[in-house]
Image (tube, rainbow, N blue to C red):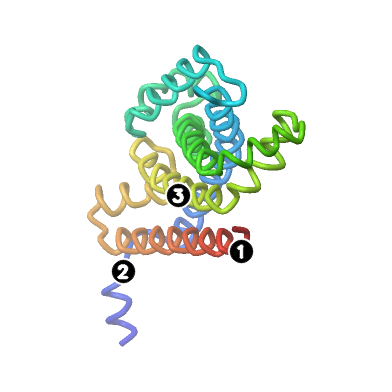
Amino acid sequence: MLDWYTETFKTQVTLEQFLQAGWETFVMVGVSLVIGTILGSVIGILLVLTRPGGIEESSFFYKVLNTVVNIVRSLPFIILMVAIIPFTRMVVGTSIGTSAAIVPLIIYISPFIGRLVESSLLEVDHGIVEAANSMGATTFQIIWKFLLPEARGSLILNFTTATIGLVGATAMAGAVGGGGIGDLALNYGYQRFDSVAMFYTVVLLVVIVQAIQSLGNFLAKRYH
């Protein structure tokens, strides 16, 4: 039985390589998510504030920012990653590896999160903003004490969606030597026809995505 199992599930990938790939994926998702959430939240809040009818309405600023967000979001991640290689090399000194993959991941996820934050904040009843205005709240207070708390459940679910999107993007980063689980799947599962390695990486990705989604659903329900 043991011989059958060993022969059937034989793979060229060692446990250390799986652990290393998992760690690289964790680093790419973690760093990109933290920085992307900060930048994306700022973008989303600015879009809400400056949009027509917003608290700090500015047609010019809104159109410029909205256009930039749309342009970046229209690019598939794999194309974006290749297109900004000179910029990536300028920032981190290389275009290959985990650190190099983080740069395009941040540029990719920030506008995406910005649009999700904008969507969540627009779901808040406008009457709450009017009530805050009538109490003399400043713009910062309206955002921090009224809009963000009211949109908390929706924001958590949207950040969950963004995190899962990032996991998928890190897998694509493997196509240009970004490291991580995607790199392992391409190098061994695709190029060396190691179907067992491919199977393990697929299972691992499914488990990661399910865990993230479950955690997001739990937090959204708890803090809604």
Q: What residue type is labelled 2?
A: Lys
Across and down, in percent, residue 167 comes to 44, 48
Q: Mark 2 points at which residue?
A: 10
Residue closest to the far right: 136
Q: Which of 81 and 184 is in front in this view?
A: 81
Q: Looking at the image, is mark 3 or mark 1 nearer the viewer?
A: 1
- Residue 103 location, x and y as percent? 50, 30
Q: Is mark 1 on a helix, strand or loop?
A: helix
Q: Nearer the viewer, residue 32 or 18?
A: 32
- Above or below, 50 relative to 121: above
Check the image and report above or below for 27 versus 223: above
The dot on residue 161 is: 3
Q: Which residue extends farthest bottom?
A: 1
Amino acid tagged 1: Arg
Q: How far apart are marks 2 and 1 (CA)?
A: 43 Å
Crowd around label 2: few <14 · some 14–19 · many ≥20 (10 Å):
few
- Check disc 3 and give the amino acid type: Thr
> Of marks 2 and 3, which one's residue comes earlier in the chain?
2
Image point (32%, 32%), residue name = 76
Q: Residue at x 25, y 47 (%)?
A: 191
Quadrant holding the C terminus:
bottom right
Q: Mark 1 points at which residue?
A: 222
The image shows residue 29, relative to residue 76, as above or below, that is below
